[in-house]
Amino acid sequence: MPGVLFSLMLLGGLCGLGQAMSREEKSKLRNQVVEMFDHAYQNYMDHAYPADELMPLTCRGRVRGLEPSRGDVDDALGKFSLTLIDTLDTLVLLNKTTEFDVAVRRVLTDVRLDNDIVVSVFETNIRVLGGLLGGHSMAVMLRDGGQHMQWYQDELLHMAKDLGLRLLPAFNTSSGLPYPRVNLKFGVRGPETRTGTETDTCTACAGTMILEFAALSRFTGDPVFEAHARRALDFLWEKRQRHSNLVGTTINIHSGEWVRRDSGVGAGIDSYYEYLLKAYILLGDDLFLQRFNIHYASIMKYISQPPLLLDVHIHKPLLPARTWMDSLLAFFPGLQVLKGDIRPAIETHEMLYQVTKKHNFLPEAFTTDFRVHWAQHPLRPEFAESTYFLYKATGDPYYLEAGRTILDNLNRFARVPCGFAAMKDVRTGSHEDRMDSFFLAEMFKYLFLLFADAEDLTFDVEDYIFTTEAHLLPLSLSTAPHSSSIPSNTTEELDDSNFDWTCPNTRLLFPDPAFPRKLRDPIRSAVDKSCPRPPPYRYVHERGCDQVTVPCSKSISPNRCAVSAVAAEDGVRFMQEMMELSSQQQKEQLPPRAIQIVSHPFFGRVVLTAGPAQFGLDLSKSSTGVRGFATVAEPYSGCSEITNAEYVRGHIALLQRGQCMFAEKARHIQKAGAIGGIVIDDNEGSSSDTAPLFQMAGDGRSTDDIPMPLLFLFHKEGNILLEALKEYREVEVLLSDKARDRGVSPCTFGLDPDPRDCPLRLSLSAGKPLPGSVIEGCEYPFFLLPSASFPLA
């Protein structure tokens, strides 16, 4: 079958010049991946299950409707134990067959799919339907092996079909494109559904159904699912822009008109391209490869500017649509590996790796000069995914070191007592109280496989294709019985004479083993520059081409000159937008600050996003920050003389917002001897997750008399600090411009280590190190146990 050839190219190794990693080192890192997975999974099961997701800062489950709404993000939650289902096949890959057996039984016993709740069709498909199908694939594989899951009678497949039938009403549109949301109990029609009124959906949302729906059809023998997914893909293909062969980001599901005409390979489009290629691999249908190849040629012609991938307008593909990239495009080098186009994959991956090293994580969006555009990082796995695929294709140990960097940063900056917390701001290191299910579904799969040898796996992963959520579907589905009555809706003849049907061996592509390094070195140098200035952007108006220099922080692609009056108008509008952005940036005030809990049992692993004040100590100019024990001021408002000055003196005072000016509060606690202050919002439920931070203003007169720092916390983050004070007698915090090193050693913060208190269970044994990583920085012989866990109390 032609599709299988795509997996064969992964066997072609290319020896890089990097120093080979020993088997012992790879084994150590692989064990570390398993330990990290255990930390995340067990905390979900202990503190969150049966809720959909874990809230790792507050050690509880996220139940939709009980927590403040986060908007569209919450559409992934359907009260169906999302994280458990999303993690099923990860358990098998990590050789946890006993835990898998228990997890499957729990899903069958506890999970309901008929909840009266509106969910995202896209997210439910890739996470829940994909998770059930991946779990079923693993259960069948283990059952057929004769040692495990002998009781299994396709129960997960039956649940998958039930869910598939609940998603089908979303496809009841004239175009065949699905509604973006569906009510699991009532569908999309009728007032009780609370949905079905939407008109727009993203391209990826409509075009990322074929793998799961086709697998469901072929597993069950019911062609209806594959037919609907194919119809949606056919419609998107018909609506592509015929000149550029690109698709937009958002489309009207009824008319087929493009609502957003910007085109890239990141958010909103990403997995549409991924599923065209992978549908060919899984199903063996040449049509999918033909379409992918045509799209890919246009991507490389218009969007790819190695090492950058920049959005363009579908009707004017030489006109840039924005000056920044989003982190979801980090999957693309991995897709290029499957395509067999290794050179641009190496280049883009290296750019992403250098951005990662610059900020510890990939920001949700970053500019073309590699500065932060959106500062969040929800522990996305796409960079790890591409790292794995590039290592498989090249055999270059450089990518093992990239994987080590990912592991180290997760442990240093994201690990908290109850799991791993998303980064609220990569600049400050502050956390967000979320651990998305995809972290367990994808991140640990790719990292484990990166460091695993063939003998470490209980099955041949090359027999499976990864979905966009990294769920495993068997390639044998290509020969499974399926209806021949699923023709394509398009009759267009495609010229594919210029496209290869097999993937080239990378040894033949790169006979020089130094080639990957030669590609990487100039990119590393470019990212290392603090702010490379591009040549001026040129646009045309009535008097010809004039030059306008865009501010460095909003740099754009050079040397693009409009060629028509219409393009010139677009260019002027674009430049006006850039100037507005530049003006806004110049008006930007101080960035957010960090409040880091450094005492037992947190040891710096919990970081809260705080707003600064326009007065007092500028923490960005302090190399050490201000550190002290927190205490609640009396009165709590801080609007009159402090009555518990003996407790406030030498401490960081906690105050409630309201009743008087911020500067007045600062003066009162400063008079009482406080070394700093934290104002907590009095608006119950407020959070930096849903509200923008602001700066606390002065009182209209000189504030030179306030030398100490004052920071602001929203109600949710403030409650985390107040609850810590209730639980523990002494809570020490560090006020700074960004979080300090959060290595697992308590010695990092000058604390006396106690094996009962550490975020990881430690051994004081002076004998041989236990398996795992030696913890640096302590004078005591601490060693990390592979089965490390953290007691909250």
Image: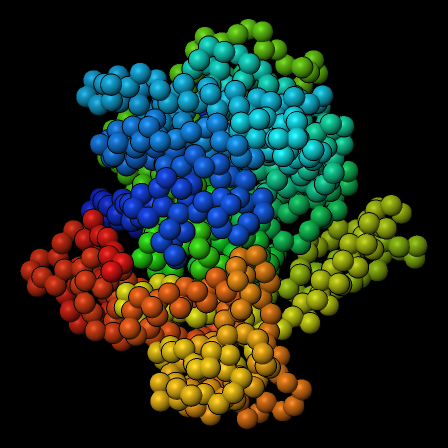
Q: Is residue 58 left or right of residue 601?
A: right
| Residue 364 visible in this rendered orientation of the protein | yes
Q: How is the image coloured?
A: rainbow
Name the residue furthest left.
Answer: 767
**Residue sitting at 85 percent across and 50 percent down?**
568
**Residue sitting at 54 percent across and 17 percent down?**
226
| Residue 414 visible in this rendered orientation of the protein | no
Q: Position of residue 787 (x, y in %)?
A: 20, 49
Quarter residue 760 falls in: bottom left
Instruction: Note whether 138 is above or below 519 in the view shown.
Output: above
Quarter residue 643 falls in: bottom left
Instruction: Note whether 110 is above or below 568 in the view shown.
Output: above
**Residue sitting at 28 percent across and 62 percent down?**
744
Q: Position of residue 161 (x, y in %)?
A: 46, 19
Quarter of the figure with the N terminus: top left
Q: Position of residue 125 (x, y in %)?
A: 51, 30
Q: Observer-nearest residue: 307 or 178?
A: 178
Q: Is residue 242 left or right of residue 384?
A: right
Q: Observer-nearest residue: 650 or 176?
A: 650
Name the residue furthest right.
Answer: 542
Quarter of the figure with the C terminus: bottom left
